[in-house]
């Protein structure tokens, strides 16, 4: 009997507590960053975009930032602006020509590679494609 | 009615218990160093009381959490004191706790028979750190948000289960609503439920084994004194001192509340509370880069706590005397110094926030408090010379030399030397020169709001709070990107006509577009004074559906030269606002959403056209009657100067004047059916405009 009681109570309780482990299915939507021609050449630029996120019981549209670097190839490289170390927002410092993270001093070169500091890998990249001159990205 | 006879023994035993508590003898030699424990108890009780009071007005959802904390601090009577006490007591608790721990360690008071007291004490210490960590997310300001993003992400570095752990702590993959409610429940329910028994057991153990007399081995206890009054008086005095410190901090330093949490901010420098700084700095040590992050972030702190917990069990040296415990004291000293060293280093290495929004010159100007003695444009004369009219281009060199050594120019001058050199000196000189340049050059044609502020300071301050001054904010930028995508970048000026009218006059829409798309700081001040005061009569627009806003700065220029009144008759009429607030928005929405105009729904901004059909229009109640009448839009005095803060629906108090809302609802299975009745008391549909 005690087994029944303990199972009957602990299963729902544990399941309830562990429910954040279930990842909500996400639609991989392509998001527009605007006409590619408007993105300046030669240095990474931050481009804000709107995306819908599900935050627990709140579904809301938030502003995120992508970092776009135009290169010789047709499709530019698009980085996420979040530091892969502990998730602070990195900033492009024009004078130094590199990305700097304000938290633990992570530094990345213009191609997103780690130059200094604790980040375990380079800046994460977003999927990108260009359609009719418009730059589209997808969060991965 | 109770049985009087049975009540007597109960009362008597309660009295006995209190008496034995108060009169319990404490060994001679116990004194001031021993007040730390009771100080902690006092602070804990204070935290419980102020915590409950704060919870009465606190709303644990993102967005609202911040608003409720501001409400507590700014609106609720004594709210800033209650929050101040709670905030500062959290830090003071850690200080007193560390001192207490240090005292017990130095006195060797954790040794037999008090091992259990020590273990429970260390558990309390860890619980209080958890209180701190969960507590400072609750205000949902920048500090709260970023400390939690970084702090929780450390859990993600645990091998194998890190990711799952991170999701469990955050309640999802980002710091958001579920994180806030989790931390709220931990802070208000779970941690208090742990602390109370821990405190009780700790106290009981202290009573049971008695307070450890300092170094009994060399100073045997010969006299015992009752707890009351000998020690109790000191305890109470110490608590009084703690409370005085808290009040002083609350009243002198205030209660910090940073800007609301913003996950897209790039100019914010995240730093945890001071007591987590050593841990923060540990992660910057190159040995913990990459895969070993887990060692610095999780293993090392956990090992430290375990070492601390087990101290009485591996430190078998029976002596409490420092002279016979050299090794233990040296080890403790090294550890403590290392922790402080890391903390101080973290503090020193914190970079200054980047000068994105404000120039270096502006920052220096504010940092050196130049404005305390010198008036800028639009300010009344202060004790020093006004800066609104100088220096000219030629005088720059002179100014630079003067700023380095004022006394060399004017012996006895009250002006202190700035101590600046190189780039910083140039930046400050530039800024001071700009104060005048701004005034001189921008007044022509389409003056900046700052130039108008020279005479119209009040209106300028009001305008700064308005949405007109924030017309190029983050949300607009994001919408701008989408609009450009959908229009192929062909109609850039469409949004900017109203959101940044100055670019139209200066003909630099492409430049501004680039800045907006690149996330750079912009060369437009949004909808400034001239946007309305130099506006051409909206009646003159040829195509009201695709209206382009046009300007006639003539009257404004005359006003600047001759101080004539720039007001034109239509400034008091609704059609003036209609220039931007009444247009066929189907055009904008259909482009913004990529849907055809019929699917985009009805036009939202027909506010003036709808208003014309109402009794408000017939009675002459215009847009300005409400949106430019004092802060709340209520007074109707004719001679009252127009209010330039333009309250709208985002101003809750203002909105409440315009609508009555009644919501009734009931649940049916998994669905909720609600009826919302809204009485719109305004002269236009809501939402609109
Ligand atoms: S979060 Fe970027 S270096 Fe740590």
Image: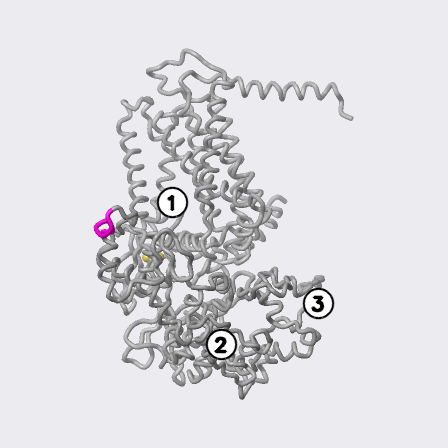
Location of mark 3 (residue):
B679
Location of mark 2 (residue):
B498
Residue B183 to residue B645: above or below: above
Kindly identify which chain the residue marked by label 2 belongs to. B
**Residue B169 screen position, x and y as percent:** 47, 53
**Which quadrant holds residue B652?**
bottom right
Residue B205 to residue A1: above or below: above
Residue, far right: B1
**Residue B97 screen position, x and y as percent:** 42, 34
B523 falls in the magenta region: no
Quarter for ligand 1? bottom left
Kindly identify which chain the residue marked by label 1 belongs to. B
**For the residues carrying marks 1 and 2, which lies nearer the camera in this image?**
2
User: What residue is at 48 percent from the left and 34 percent from the top?
Assistant: B243
Residue B408 to residue B458: above or below: above
Left or right, B443 with reference to B617: left
Residue, far bottom: B542
Magenta-drawn segment:
B405-411
In the rendered image, residues at marks 1 and 2 fall on the same chain: yes
In the rendered image, residues at marks 1 and 3 fall on the same chain: yes
**For the residues carrying marks 1 and 3, which lies nearer the camera in this image?**
3
Kindly identify which chain the residue marked by label 3 belongs to. B
Location of mark 1 (residue):
B274
**Which quadrant holds residue B320?**
top left
**Residue B623 screen position, x and y as percent:** 61, 72
């Amino acid at each position: 009997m005690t087994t029944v009681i303990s199972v009957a109570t602990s299963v729902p309780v544990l399941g309830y507590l562990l429910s954040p482990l279930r990842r909500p299915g996400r639609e991989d939507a392509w998001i527009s960053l605007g006409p590619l021609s408007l993105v300046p050449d030669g240095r990474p630029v931050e481009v804000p975009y709107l995306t819908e996120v599900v935050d627990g019981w709140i579904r809301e549209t938030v502003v995120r930032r992508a970092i776009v670097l135009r290169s010789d190839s047709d499709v530019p490289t698009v980085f996420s602006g979040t530091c892969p170390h502990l998730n602070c927002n990195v900033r492009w410092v024009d004078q130094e020509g590199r990305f700097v993270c304000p938290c633990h001093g992570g530094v990345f070169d213009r191609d997103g590679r780690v130059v200094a500091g604790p980040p375990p890998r380079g800046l994460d990249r977003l999927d990108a494609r260009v359609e009719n001159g418009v730059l589209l990205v997808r969060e991965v | 009615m109770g049985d009087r006879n049975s009540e007597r023994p109960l009362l008597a035993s309660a009295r006995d218990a209190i008496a034995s508590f108060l009169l319990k003898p404490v060994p001679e030699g116990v004194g001031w160093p021993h007040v730390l424990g009771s100080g902690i108890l006092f602070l804990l009780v204070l935290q419980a009381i102020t915590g409950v009071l704060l919870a009465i007005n606190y709303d644990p959802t993102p967005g609202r959490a911040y608003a409720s904390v501001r409400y507590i601090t700014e609106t609720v009577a004594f709210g800033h004191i209650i929050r101040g006490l709670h905030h500062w007591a959290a830090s003071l608790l850690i200080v007193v706790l560390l001192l207490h721990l240090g005292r017990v360690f130095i006195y060797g008071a954790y040794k037999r028979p008090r091992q259990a007291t020590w273990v429970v004490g260390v558990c309390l210490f860890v619980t209080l750190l958890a209180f701190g960590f969960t507590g400072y997310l609750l205000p949902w300001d920048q500090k709260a948000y970023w400390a939690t993003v970084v702090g929780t992400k450390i859990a993600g570095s645990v091998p194998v289960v890190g990711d799952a752990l991170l999701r469990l702590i955050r309640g999802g993959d980002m710091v958001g609503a579920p994180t806030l409610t989790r931390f709220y429940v931990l802070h208000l329910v779970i941690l208090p439920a742990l602390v109370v028994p821990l405190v009780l057991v700790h106290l009981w153990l202290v009573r049971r084994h008695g307070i450890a007399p300092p170094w009994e081995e060399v100073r045997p206890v010969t006299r015992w004194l009752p707890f009351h009054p000998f020690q109790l008086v000191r305890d109470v005095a110490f608590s009084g001192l703690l409370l005085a410190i808290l009040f002083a901090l609350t009243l002198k330093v205030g209660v910090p509340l940073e800007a609301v949490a913003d996950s897209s901010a790039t100019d914010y420098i995240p730093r945890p509370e001071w007591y987590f700084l050593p841990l923060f700095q540990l992660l910057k040590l190159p040995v913990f880069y990459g895969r070993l992050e887990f060692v610095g972030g999780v293993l090392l702190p956990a090992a430290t706590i375990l070492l601390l917990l087990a101290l009485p069990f591996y430190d078998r040296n029976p002596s409490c005397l420092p002279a016979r415990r050299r090794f233990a004291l040296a080890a403790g000293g090294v550890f403590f110094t290392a922790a402080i060293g890391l903390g101080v280093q973290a503090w020193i290495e914190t970079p200054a926030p980047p000068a994105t929004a404000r120039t270096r010159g502006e920052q220096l100007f504010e940092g050196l408090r130049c404005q305390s003695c010198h008036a800028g444009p639009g300010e009344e004369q202060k004790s020093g010379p006004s800066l609104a009219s100088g220096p000219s281009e030629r005088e720059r060199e002179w100014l630079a030399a003067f700023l380095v050594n004022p006394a060399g120019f004017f012996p006895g001058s009250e002006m202190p030397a700035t101590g600046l050199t190189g780039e910083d000196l140039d930046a400050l000189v530039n800024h001071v020169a700009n104060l005048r340049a701004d005034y001189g050059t921008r007044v022509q044609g389409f003056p900046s709001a700052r130039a108008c502020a020279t005479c119209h300071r009040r209106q300028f301050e009001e305008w700064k709070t308005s949405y007109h001054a924030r017309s190029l904010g983050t949300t607009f930028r994001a919408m701008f990107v989408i609009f450009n995508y959908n229009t192929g970048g062909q109609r850039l000026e469409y949004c900017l006509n109203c959101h940044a009218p100055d670019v139209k006059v200066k003909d630099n829409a492409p430049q501004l577009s680039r800045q907006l798309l690149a996330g750079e700081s912009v060369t437009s001040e949004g909808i400034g004074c001239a946007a309305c005061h130099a506006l051409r009569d909206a009646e003159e627009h040829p195509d009201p559906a695709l209206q382009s806003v046009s300007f006639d700065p003539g009257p404004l220029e005359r006003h600047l030269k001759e101080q004539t009144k720039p007001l034109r008759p239509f400034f008091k009429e609704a059609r003036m606002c209609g220039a931007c607030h009444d247009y066929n928005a189907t055009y904008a929405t259909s482009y913004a959403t990529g849907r055809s105009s019929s699917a985009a729904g009805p036009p939202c901004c027909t506010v003036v056209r709808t208003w014309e059909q109402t009794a408000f229009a017939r009675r002459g109640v215009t847009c300005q009657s409400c949106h430019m009448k004092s802060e709340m839009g209520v007074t109707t005095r004719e001679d009252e100067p127009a209010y330039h803060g333009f309250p709208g629906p985002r101003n809750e108090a203002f909105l409440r004047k315009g609508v009555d809302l009644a919501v009734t609802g009931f649940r049916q299975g998994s669905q909720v059916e609600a009826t919302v009745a809204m009485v719109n008391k305004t002269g236009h549909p809501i939402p609109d405009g």
